[in-house]
Amino acid sequence: MTGKFLWFEGIPFPSVDYSPELLREVQESFLIKDEDVLLLTFPKSGVILKEEQREKRREEEKKNDTGRPSFGVILKEEQREKRRQKEKKNDTRRPSFGTNWLIETVCLIYSKGDPKWVQSEPIWDRSPWVETKHGYELLKEKEGPRLISSHLPIQLFPKSFFKSKAKVIYLVRNPRDVFVSGYFFWKSAKFVKRPQSLEQYFEWFIQGNMPFGSWFDHIRGWMSMRDKENFLVLSYEEMKWDTRSTVEKICQFLGKKLEPEELNSVLKNNSFQVMKENNMSNFSLLKGQYLEENGLLLRKGVTGDWKNYFTVAQAEIFDKLFQEKMADLPQELFAWE
């Protein structure tokens, strides 16, 4: 398995399960149906850090406190500790970022909280990624309403979608946390060019030379659809802070009604612990082949974890770039700190 990028239309893609011919066919020929539901995100789904690694890092922070920045302002240790305590108090142990959380949640909504479906079929078959060879072939054979996942930027998405009534749920997360999450994931993946250091990956990220291209371009492209009635924008932060309300919002958007006990079952079965133990959802089936054996896809989701990794200089560069790229978009779209 080669660790390199496959380039298509100026965008880098993983080198396994993708090809220029397939990506072109998906864009030009794949038929999106009115009854389809599309789950769109920019990768990556979560940081692959074990809990003990995170605790070790926090202990090192206390010993060697360099004052990590918050939007260019250095936080004091007591401020960080206060934030951690608040996060701990409100922690519902949801998967980090939420690509897979979103798929799992929508599947559970469709099954009215019954976990049998999510426990018996791999997540990539329940809502296949249309841009992959496996997902494309699977979706072509599926009949009736389909759940379709994708990381594609808007300019490479199937053209048929823009003439359809298919519903889209687009999930966005603080790009600083996406950056940290992506670094730890991609450096353990066997199917892409791996970053050799956090500093190298920072350069990749701000230049858009990473799988699926620029986060900024991805968001800006899809946010052009935000006022359409068939387009729902959610944030990971919103999803983490008030999971019940987010699930209710998804239900309303999809026209699905859940009884109170069914909603409770959705919330129970899309929790971190349940997903972590479900081999159909935790991607453990791919260990060794696509991911290093010690790689974990799911962990306890933490918002603001980027402060533990960014230097002051990196935070300043990132903040300036964010302001330049996103200034003309409504700030309420970005529901983080």
Image: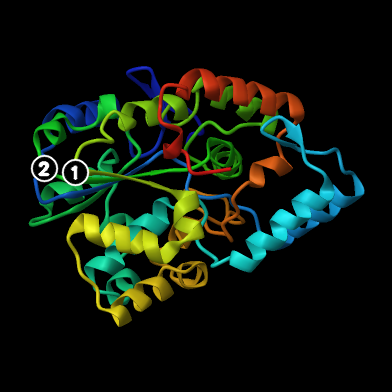
The crowding category of the residue bearing disc 1, from other C-alpha atoms within 10 Å (few below 14, some 14 to 19, many at least 20), is some
Classify residue 252 by image quadrant.
bottom left
Residue 62, relative to residue 113: is it above or below?
A: above
Q: Position of residue 172 (x, y in %)?
A: 42, 42
Q: Position of residue 125 (x, y in %)?
A: 27, 57
Q: In the orientation shown, which residue stands out farthest toward the right?
A: 63
Kindly identify the amino acid type of the residue bearing the numbered disc 1: Asn
Q: Which mark is residue 230?
A: 1
From the viewer's perspective, is 75 left or right of 102?
A: right
Which residue in the structure is indicated by mark 2?
Answer: 165
Taking depth in this image into account, of 236 and 333 the one nearest to the observer is 333
Q: For the residue labelled by badge 2, is the local secondary structure a helix, a strand or a loop? A: loop
Kindly identify the amino acid type of the residue bearing the numbered disc 2: Lys
Q: Position of residue 253 (x, y in %)?
A: 23, 55
Q: Residue at the spot x=51%, y=33% of the render?
A: 3
Q: Are marks 2 and 1 in contact (CB under 8 Å)?
A: yes
Q: Residue at the spot x=58%, y=49% of the render?
A: 47
From the viewer's perspective, is 298 left or right of 138?
A: right
Q: How many numbered dots are placed on residues in this image?
A: 2
| Mark closest to the chain's N terminus, 2 or 1 | 2
From the viewer's perspective, is 76 left or right of 194?
A: right
Taking depth in this image into account, of 52 and 34 the one nearest to the observer is 34
Residue 69, relative to residue 282: is it above or below?
A: above
